[in-house]
Amino acid sequence: MDKELLLYQYFANQLSKDGQKLFNELLEKDPEFKAQFEFENNLKRVIKKKQNENLKQKLAGFENEIKSNKTKPNTKTNFKFWSVAASFALLIALGWMAYSTFSKPDYDALYASNFETYPNTVYTITRSDNNQSLERHAFSSYEANDHKTAVAAFLDLKTKGETAQVDFYLAQSYLNLGKDKEAIEVLKRVIADGREFKAEAHWYLALAYLKSKDEENAIATLKRLIENFDYKKEKAEALLKELD
């Protein structure tokens, strides 16, 4: 599929499942495509912000006009004015509701532009390695982006007592499969365990909350990451600004 068409379909919310899969792969592996996406996403955000500012000014103008046009009570003119004023008040209320709704961050776009699968740093896989262990099977599937197989293998490893490292990579596979709720629970365990990947788990937990549109927990997790760790600190600060 043409990359420009793919971007157009993404921003028009017209991507099919196959298109979304291709979009995610390009975003992760094609730096030029990712740069174009981020440029267009930032442009969209600037345009939306300008439109919201214009709407806000117009609504404020309506409100000031209502306040400045007070008339004497119990007159026909007064009744007519307050009918118009009530219409303006309703328009203001509806306008602010629309402003509040459409000015919210694009959670999917923010997630897509920040998520990158964490590399396998635990188990080195070489072609000459004839080891047929479950661990090798799990991490070779992970590196091959066969995350469905990787999840099954990681869950098997957990039954054998492997926890911290396995949980972190299990969460990565869940995120790649779009299983955000499962990823959140696993990442919370990694953080609670506190031995390995604690900083990294905060970053991916924030992204998982973001994908789930849980802005409150995403912000809280980003703040803890910034306060306590250096991992992805600049990106976390930038993302926090987008959400605040």
Image (cartoon, rainbow, N blue to C red):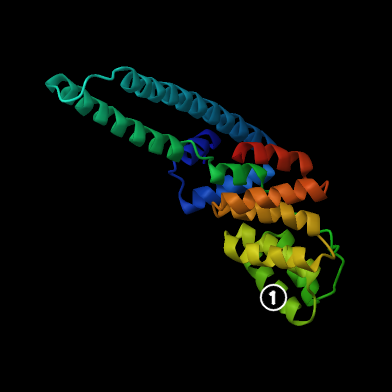
Q: Residues within 10 Å of mark 1 (few under 14, many from 20)?
A: some
Residue lying furthest left: 76
Residue 146 visible from this viewpoint = no
Q: State whether residue 109 appears in this view.
A: yes
Please provide percent x and percent y for residue 119. 78, 55
- Residue at 59 percent across and 35 percent down: it is 37
Looking at the picture, which amino acid does disc 1 mark?
A: Leu
Residue that extends furthest to the bottom in the rendered view of this protein: 160
Q: Where is residue 83, by image quadrant?
A: top left
Q: 132 left or right of 185?
A: right
Image point (68%, 44%), residue name: 29
Residue nearest the observer in this picture, 53 or 63: 63
Q: Where does residue 238 sit, x and y in percent of width and height?
A: 69, 37
Q: Quadrant of the C terminus?
A: top right
- Circle 1 residue: 155
Quadrant housing residue 162: bottom right
Instruction: Tell whether 182 sits left or right of 228.
Output: left
Q: Position of residue 189 (x, y in %)?
A: 72, 68
Rendered view: 62 above or below 143: above
| Residue 224 sits above or below residue 32 on the image | below
Residue 203: give x, y in percent of width and height.
72, 51
Q: Secondary structure at mark 1?
A: helix
The correct choice, above or below, for 54 with respect to 197 in the image is above
At x 58%, y 63%, the residue is 181
| Residue drawn where x is 45% and y is 38% of the image | 100
